[in-house]
Image (tube, rainbow, N blue to C red):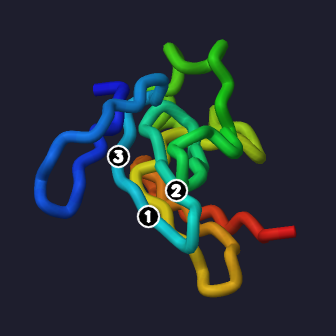
Amino acid sequence: HNTLQIFSMDGKYLETIAGFGLPANVETQGNLMLVPELKACVTLLNEKNEVVARLGRAVERLDEVKDLRGKPDQWKDGQFVHPHDACFAPNGDLFVAEWVATGRITKLVKV
């Protein structure tokens, strides 16, 4: 549950990438792959499947995250709660949709 499995387009298994906090989806743009993780993180990988950036990873919060989805009064500004989907805008900005009681979408501006 904390891995990504990589296959070729003809279905041949290529590799397993470990170290994720319940990856929920993937999105690609150019040589980047965007992986929203249900445990409060969004990860960007390059074309070699190497981590380029981890956004929002707060290891000390991983156990409490599962209990925060329905408690908006406990959400912290600038921190993800439960990223469920993410996508690239054409200019490289990121949009992250979270699976929380009220729903929440965060825009991250490419700099």
CA distance separating discs 3 and 2: 10 Å
Q: Quadrant of the C terminus?
A: bottom right
The residue under label 1 is: 27
Where residue 110 appears, as percent x and y from the top left, is 79, 69
Q: Earlier in the sequence, mark 1 or mark 2?
A: 1
CA distance separating discs 1 and 3: 10 Å
The residue under label 2 is: 34
Identify the residue at horizontal 20%, vertical 62% (top origin).
Answer: 9
**Tag 1–tag 2 contact (CB < 8 Å):** yes
Please state if 61 lies on the left or on the right of 4 as rendered: right
Identify the residue at horizontal 68%, vertical 75% (top origin).
Answer: 92
Residue 15 position by quadrant: top left
Could you tell me the amino acid type at mark 2? Leu
Q: Earlier in the sequence, mark 3 or mark 2?
A: 3
Residue 50 position by quadrant: top right
For disc 1, the neighbor class at 10 Å (few under 14, some 14 to 19, many from 20) is some
Where residue 80 appears, as percent x and y from the top left, is 61, 43
Q: What label does residue 24 carry, if any?
A: 3
Please state if 15 lies on the left or on the right of 33 as rendered: left
Q: In the displayed image of the protein, which residue is found farthest to the bottom?
A: 90
Classify 14 as above or below 35.
Answer: above
Identify the residue at horizontal 52%, vertical 56% (top origin).
Answer: 34
Where residue 18 appears, as percent x and y from the top left, is 42, 25
For disc 2, the neighbor class at 10 Å (few under 14, some 14 to 19, many from 20) is many
Say which element carries label 1. strand
Identify the residue at horizontal 50%, vertical 14% (top origin).
Answer: 63
Q: Quadrant of the N terminus?
A: top left
Please state if 2 lies on the left or on the right of 65 as rendered: left
Could you tell me the amino acid type at mark 3? Ala
